[in-house]
Image (spheres, rainbow, N blue to C red):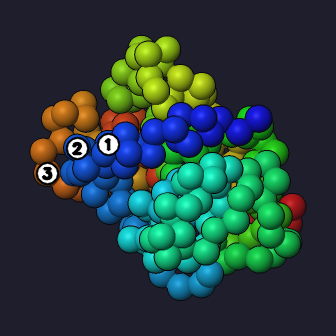
Amino acid sequence: MPKTEPFDKHLDLYEEWFVVNRYVYESELKAIRHLLPQQGEGLEIGVGSGLFAQPLGIKTGIDPSFVMITKARERGINMKEGVAENIPFPDNSFDYALMVTTICFVDNVDRSLKEVVRILKDNGVFILAFVDKNSPVGKEYLRMKEKSLFYKEATFFSTQEMMTALKKAGLQPEDTVQTIFGSLDQVKTVQDFVPGYGEGSFVVIRSKKNINE
């Protein structure tokens, strides 16, 4: 079952987080934008209220939360109700797809990534952005998990685990960047991203659909 209840009930708190943590948000956008294709038709999976899709120029999104769908539509996103394990679009529909902190909420990671492969065109690109469970912020989220409104039901992953899952699904990792250095309350300016992973808490992996799969 989709983990939508906190997002359905607490849209205002969800959006407030991005205001309070504005520099974290802008740092994450900067890192994603660096790896996001500049052309083609894109889909954001787990679009939420559209806070990433809108500034990144992604026109289409899916989400299981009706409340989030409604807000994303207000931001100009063409929305469909749906989950990552069953994306409501035909095969080979998109040039690229994006997931931002969505992978920790899916019920079945392998099936979700297989669906990404299915809806991507040949040589399509997948951008996966998430909080590494072994990072400072990831460890804090895990420590506070039971008390967290939004992350109580989340399952966090390491970058190595996600690399393995991407390859298993037929996605070949091409590039990885990281940002958010230090705890969230230490991020007082927009941070630059750096290559690789293992230091920054927010990791972005760009992978390409393996057409031999």
Q: What's the amino acid at mark 3?
A: Thr
Q: Residue at x 47, y 19 (%)?
A: 145
Pick the residue in front: 159 or 51: 51
Residue pointed to by mark 2:
20
Q: Are marks 1 and 3 in contact (CB under 8 Å)?
A: no
Label 2 close to label 1 by CB (< 8 Å): yes
* Residue at the spot of label 1: 17
Q: Is residue 86 visible?
A: yes
User: Residue 75 at what x, y percent from top left?
Assistant: 45, 71
Q: Which residue, as the protein is rendered here, is positioned at the far left?
A: 188
Per the image, label 3 sits on a secondary structure element best described as loop
Q: Secondary structure at mark 1?
A: helix
Mark 1 or mark 3, earlier in chain: 1
Amino acid found under the numbered disc labelled 2: Val
Q: Residue 124's spot in the image, x, y percent?
A: 69, 73
For disc 3, the neighbor class at 10 Å (few under 14, some 14 to 19, many from 20) is few
Q: Residues within 10 Å of mark 2 (few under 14, many from 20)?
A: few
